[in-house]
Amino acid sequence: MKRLVLALLLAITACAPSEPEAPAHTTVTRDDPAFQNGFRHEFADVDGVRMHYVTGGSGTPVVLLHGWPQTWYGWWPIMPELAEHHTVYALDLPGLGDSTGAATSYDKATLARYVHGLTEKLGLRQPSVVGHDLGAAVAFQYASQFPADTARLGYLDLPLPGPAIDARTYRRLSWHIAFHSQPEVPETLVDDDVRDYLRLFYPQVSYGGTAFGGTSAASPFTDAEIDEYARTYRTSLKNGFELYRALDQDVRDTEAAAPVQAPTLVMAAEGQAEAIRGTVAPRVTNVVRAVGVPRAGHWLVEENPEFVTAELLRFLSS
């Protein structure tokens, strides 16, 4: 009899509907109390692209734009503190992260128009726009094209392609820029080993990594963070590399861009602030501060979040 009851219970359990699987874009945040207490995932359709963004907080709006190979999640270490003073919007660029569809082009002027389409849809009035890596070039283009809709510009750790550096010279700055610029080759070689590629890449441009004259560096990314980036880049490798293939157009667009007059903060890896400032100076007329982040290579937010947060809060409130 006991065996019969047990068999019936097992049968009922097997037939019972299981809980629906959580959407993939919530995987990295669903067990994070800091996220659950003040942030949410949202989507909006902009010119044929379904754009994913994360928002939270209150106060004047701040839009955060990631570079390669990251997503909105690259801003997470500093978002809770920023959100104590501002309404934060961390975006996935078109066709990257959990944004679906593909941009008509991955030149940064075009991507800036997608971002502006989203800020218009959200009803944001004069947000401050902060970008890191190639997202900084998107932020620059946003501020150039939409000056009336830009309160301040945060420009983090990217030599700006344009008058100071032409495309040919830019591709010589690092092996990965030249490699990623090749048609079809990088996604063909990386496709089966996305996580390993990212795992090996991150330390190279970290503090003490080979890109900064060192011999080795520990990755500032946890295994969980690498898993999250690998999850999205497995399906968006081509779009990610298109960011680099647009370099020639980016140079032309920067050369033709209207000078940015919004107050601008430049942040860069330790020892690199003036070099980065020199590349933006021909097109940014109001750099109020250029600062190197102590003990940080390219990954400013991950390597020294306290310093980056303090600088951004001071800049955004000044």
Image (spheres, rainbow, N blue to C red):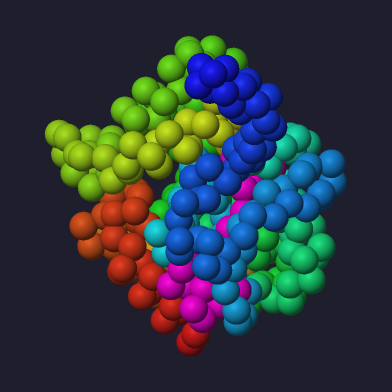
Q: Residue, x 23% and y 62% (percent of image)? A: 294
Front in this rendered view, residue 256 or 135? 135
Residue 263 against residue 46 in the figure, above or below: below
Q: Residue, x 68% and y 42% (percent of image)? A: 99
Residue 287 against residue 159 in the figure, above or below: below
Q: Position of residue 60 (x, y in %)?
A: 62, 80
Q: Position of residue 24 (x, y in %)?
A: 60, 38
Front in this rendered view, residue 14 or 55? 14
Q: Position of residue 236 (x, y in %)?
A: 61, 29
Residue 65 seen anywhere in this rendered image of the structure: yes
Tell me where residue 147 sits by quadrant.
bottom right
Quadrant the N terminus occupies? top right
What segment is highlighted magenta in the picture? 79-97
Q: Residue, x 47% and y 51% (percent of image)? A: 31
Q: Is residue 160 magenta?
A: no
Q: Residue, x 50% and y 61% (percent of image)? A: 35
Q: Position of residue 309 (x, y in %)?
A: 38, 70
Residue 129 seen anywhere in this rendered image of the structure: no
